[in-house]
Amino acid sequence: MIRREAEIVKYEARLAYTLLIPSFVILVVLAFYPLASVFVNSFTNKIFASATKADYVGFKNYGKLLSLTVKELPPVIDEGSGQPVVDQESGKIIFERPIKVLPREPRRYKEVLQFDFFGKRLVLGATDRAFIYAAFDTITFTVVSVIIEVILGLGIAIVLNSRFKGRGLMRAVMLIPWAIPTAVSSRMWAWMFASTRVGFINVFLQMLGLGNGQVAFITSDAYQLWVMVAIDVWKTTPFMALLLLAGLQLIPQEMYEAGRVDGASKLRQFRSLTLPLLKPTIAIALVFRTLDALRVFDVFQIVLAQKRYSLASFIYYQLIDNQAMGYSSAASVIVFILIFLFALLYIKAIGGANSNE
Amino acid sequence: MNKKQISKVLNSGAFYLLVVLIFIYLAFPFYWAINSSLKSEAQLQMTPATLVPEHPVDNSFSPTLQNYKAVFRNKKFARGLLNSAVVAISTTTLALLIGSFAAFALGKLRFRGKSASLYLILAMTMFPQVAVLTGLYAVIRTLGVSAIPGMILSYMLFTLPFTVWVMTAFFRSLPISLLQSAQVDGATPFQSFYLILLPLTAPALVTTGLLAFIAAWNEYLFALTFTSIEPTARTVPVVIALFTGEIAHQEPFGEIMAAAVIVTIPLILLVFVFQKKIVAGLTAGAVKG
């Protein structure tokens, strides 16, 4: 009998490895090998879909992607008086154009932004402006949309947590934005955001007395990012609400009854009961959403195309349109590291929070 | 009515107003797509845009089905639907098959390296797909497969870890006594897997299968990249994203919206029928944490 038991254990282990083989082969082929090849290619000037031999270029791709410099902009000096030139209308000092101070060798830097620092006018330059913008936009998009989604999602979850007629219907409706392909919802929203009053948003805002009905949401720099946030919030808030709702339903009702007996107000109950008990669920939802938002692609590529990039659409266009496989790979490695760092940060934060309890 | 009753009515009125507002926010874009899909080119250009298709002159209600007819005549769209169905069904089947093998091992069998394997697979769910885009395309080309099998294979990257994760939790929750009694009856572990456990796991298979299907049906990045040199293999999201009309310089918004509605309706039906299962699957990983 003992011998039979040992045999079974051995058989079990052998069976387990056999059953795991297909999954691991797939993961190696689809994740580890491609990741390794992206890493190797990032040090070459490989051209996509071409037979030309690639050369090793060291850190050149990374250098071009990440080179930043800060230079001081001198004011324009009036040749006659030797004083800085002042704009007649605004009374502000006029500064030299950034192109005069930004280095051109070995690589040309272009202006990213200007800012005032202790009374000096500084200019931030980068060798690949588009990538720096993409990184900045993606991080802004991620932070803003995830914060809105958590707050809005929590609100919706609390509403849906009460019993009312039509709750089942509401739950099904909540799955609609999530279930529609992002490619499809992006086009729906792009049409709603049309730049004249053929678009619903312009009509709606004008009805509220906002705007002139001609707001160019998709082509204007000032609105593009917020359009992206609006679309993502619509698509993802219900998903967030469902996660939080599931968390809410795990909180035993007796705790609220105890709270009521003690005379705690609704707000007080929310702050000292709901929120702390929901914290683990919020934390996990936050991790998923952040890591997801950092790799945003569909909505940027479909609505803005090459007008403005997310990190992922930057990688895509470098690969497909510019065929710069080496360069695109280097950008991929940077994105991978960025997401990995975010994941580590979160795991640490959640781990720390849990051990405190 | 006394004061208390009045405040109760007001409260529940405010509550339902909130529910209705949430409903409108979630459903309105889809309504707008339906509305736009029933308008002719001229009606689409009317300003301000109308809430229902109206006749440009006498403002009477006058929807048209011409956009739907045009979409159904469109060969690229029909092809896209077929491609999407093939890709999504194959992806789901493959992920469930391979995933449930791995999940059975991880959930019920004793072997060394179990938790390491589980963590490795869990880590994969956070893997940024875009980071391997270039490398994955190279793999697909090296394997010499065309775009459709390429998509099916590469969709394993996000469907497989999820399937394994949810199914492992499910297998674990099944009582071990079932397995033991099978062993006493002389069944090998593999026999007990497909004779006893697999039929029991049907509900979990439906849940994970639905999620895998929707994920595959909606995927865009890989589909766009892998079909860039093989346009006949394009799936529906790519077809819709690249949709252009007969007249190249003018985007046919009515047709795009009709196509969007056609693609979305099956998903909405799926969501209404399987609502509980989908929610259970979506929240499975998150709440237990």
Image (cartoon, coloured by chain):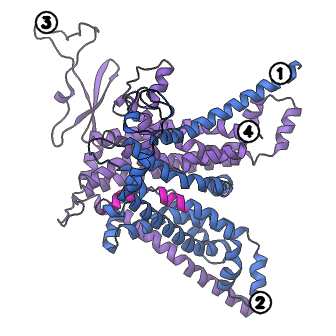
Locate the N terminus of chain A by quadrant: bottom right
Return the disc, 1 or 2, that comes first in the chain's sequence. 1
Question: Which structural element holds mark 4?
Answer: helix
Nearer the observer: mark 3 or 2; the answer is 2
In the picture of the structure, the residue carrying the numbered disc 3 is: A81
The chief SS type of the magenta part is: helix
Cα gap from disc 3 to disc 2, whole angstroms: 104 Å
Q: Can you tell which quarter of the image residue B26 is in? A: top right
In the picture of the structure, the residue carrying the numbered disc 1 is: B6
Pointers 4 and 2 in contact (C-beta within 8 Å) = no
Question: Residue B224 at x, y = what percent?
Answer: 36, 56
Q: Is residue A206 above or below residue A277?
A: above
Q: Which residues are magenta?
A: B212-230
In the picture of the structure, the residue carrying the numbered disc 4 is: A274
In the picture of the structure, the residue carrying the numbered disc 2 is: B185
Question: Which structural element holds mark 2?
Answer: loop
What colour has chain A?
A: purple
The chain whose colour is blue is: B
Cα gap from disc 1 to disc 3, whole angstroms: 77 Å
Cα gap from disc 3 to disc 4, whole angstroms: 68 Å
What amino acid type is highlighted by mark number 4? Thr
Q: Is residue B111 above or below residue A193?
A: below
Q: Callout 2: few (<14), some (14-19), or many (20+) C-alpha neighbours within 10 Å?
A: few
Task: Please give the count of numbered marks on the rendered protein.
Answer: 4
Is label 3 on the same chain as label 4? yes
Question: Which structural element holds mark 1?
Answer: helix
